[in-house]
Image: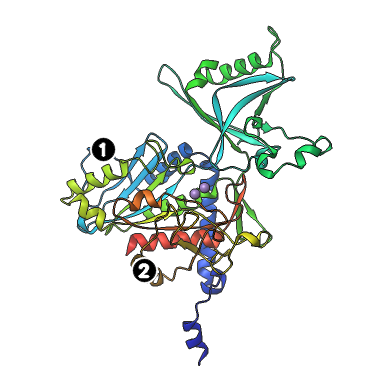
Amino acid sequence: MSKEQKNKLIYEKKTVYEKADKSVIDAAFAYADGYKSYLDAAKTEREAVKVSIELAKAKGFKEYRLGDKISAGDKLYYNNRGKNLFVFSVGTKPINEGIKITAAHIDAPRIDLKQCPVIEDGGMCFFKTHYYGGIRKYQWVATPLALHGVIATVDGKNIDVCIGEDESDPVFYINDLLPHLGYEQAKLPLESGIKGEQLNILVGSIPDDEDGTIKLNVLKLLNEKYGIDEEDLLSAELSVVPAAKARDVGFDRALIGSYGHDDRVCAYPALTAILEADGNNTCMCILADKEETGSDGPTGMQCDLMLDLINELASQLGGNPAVVRANSQCLSADVSAVFDPNFPEVFEKQNAPLLSCGAVFTKFTGSRGKSGTNDANAEFIGYLRSILAKDGVVWQAGELGKVDCGGGGTVAKYISKHNIDTIDLGVPVIAMHAPYEVVSKVDVYETFRAIRAFYKY
Ligand code: MN
Ligand code: MN
C-alpha cells in the first residue's frame, strides 16, 4: 500500500502547523492581535456588546428595532438590553432557504456584588459578593481585581463603572490565609478551602474624619466619583474580574493568556466572520448572555427573542417561519477542554481536543450517558465536513473529558429545539473558567475560518 493510500485510509489528527500553509499561520498571529484588543475592551457582556456594535458599525451595520422594515442586502444589529446582541446580514437568496446562525456567549465566570454590599470589620471595608458561574473559588483570592458594571439611578441615569484596568487605577483584592496559619485550611478539599461568603472584596481602610468609619469614607469617595448614595447600589450590576490584560504566552508567542476566553474566543470569530459575510446567505450571529448560569432571563438563549427575529425576517421577506427554521443551521460556538498532560486522568486522549489541532466540533455534550445534550446529526456533520474541506479549514472532533468524569452543556439545545440543525464548535481551552485561561492562536483562527466557511457556502 502506498503512503498516500495509507494516509487516506487512516485518520490521523495533526496540528495546524503541520497541515496549513505558512500564510495561514501568519494570518492567525495577525488575527490574534485584534482578538487581544477585543478581550481587554470586553470583560463583561455589556462591554462586549458595546465593542461589538462599534466593530459592526465600522463595517456599515445599522441598528434594527423590532418592527423596522427589513430588505435583502441589509446589514443589521439588534441590541437586547445592552447585554445580548444579534448581528445579521440579510442575503439575496430566498429566506425560506434558511438562516446560517452562530451563537456564542459573552458572559464569563466572575464575582458579582450583592445588592447591599458594603461592610466593615477589623480596619477594612469590603464589598460582599455572590459569585457568577462555575468558578473555582480558591483561584480568585490574592490576585488583583477590577470593578466593572453599571449603576442605574432613580432619575434614569446609567452610570458606567470601570476601575482597575488603567495602570494608574487602584485595584481590588480578596484576602487569603497565610500558609503559616493555614494548616487546617490546607487539609480541606479544594472545593471548600475558600467559601462563597469569604469572597469579600477589599475596598478601603481609611476611617472617615467625622464618624470614624471606613464605610462612610468609601461611600463619600463613591459619591464624589459617581454622585451616588449607598441606596443606588440596590439598582446596580457590579462585578469584579481579573485586572490582568491579554498577553502572549510562551517563548514562541503561540498562545494567548487572558480572562474570559470562554466564550469571547468564539464570540470574536463569529462576529468578525459575519462582518465579512458576502450577502448571499442570510446569516445571524448571536452573542448571548447568561450562558454560565443556565441561559435564563431575557438576555439568555432560552428567551424567545431569537424566534421573534426569525419570524420578522420570514414575514417581511415573504417566507414561512416554520420553513425558515427547518432549513436553518446553527453553529453553537463555545469552548472545549483541551487535553492537558498535567491532568491526563480526566481525558480520553484519542477523543479529547488537542492543542493547536484546529477548531473543535463536539457532536454531543451533557453528562452521564449523554444526558441533556443536543446530539448533532451525522448528515449535518457530513455537510460541514464538505464545506470545511473547500476552505482547507483544520478541525478536529472533540469530547469534553472521559465518560462519567463530569460534563457540561452549551446553548446548543436551546436552539436545536426549534427544529434547527445545531452542532457545537469552538476553541480548545487550557484551564477553562480560571481567572486566566490559555488558548492557541491557530485554534482561534481556524475557528474563525470554520465560521466564515459556514456563512459563505
Ligand atoms: Mn462557554
Ligand atoms: Mn463556561
Residue lying at 79% horizontally and 36% vertically, measured from the top left? 178
How was the colour assigned to the protein in this rendering?
rainbow
Percent across and percent down for residue 155 are 41, 16
The image position of residue 177, as x and y in percent, is 76, 35
Q: Which residue is mark 2?
A: 387
Mark 1: give few (<14), some (14-19) or many (20+) Cα within 10 Å.
Answer: few
Q: Is residue 186 left or right of residue 377?
A: right
For label 2, the crowd category at 10 Å Cα-Cα, with few meaning under 14, some 14 to 19 and many 20 or more, is: some
Residue beneath disc 1? 66
- How many angstroms separate mark 2 from mark 1 (CA)? 33 Å
Residue depicted at 48% across the width and 42% down the height:
107
- Amino acid, disc 1: Leu
Q: Is residue 291 visible to us here?
A: yes
Asked whether mark 2 and ligand 1 are closer than 8 Å, the reply comes as no
Q: Which sits in the foreground, 338 or 449?
A: 338
CB under 8 Å between discs 2 and 1: no
44 to the left or right of 437 = left
Residue 172 seen anywhere in this rendered image of the structure: no
Disc 2 residue type?
A: Ile
SS type, badge 1:
loop
Q: Nearer the viewer, residue 57 or 452?
A: 452
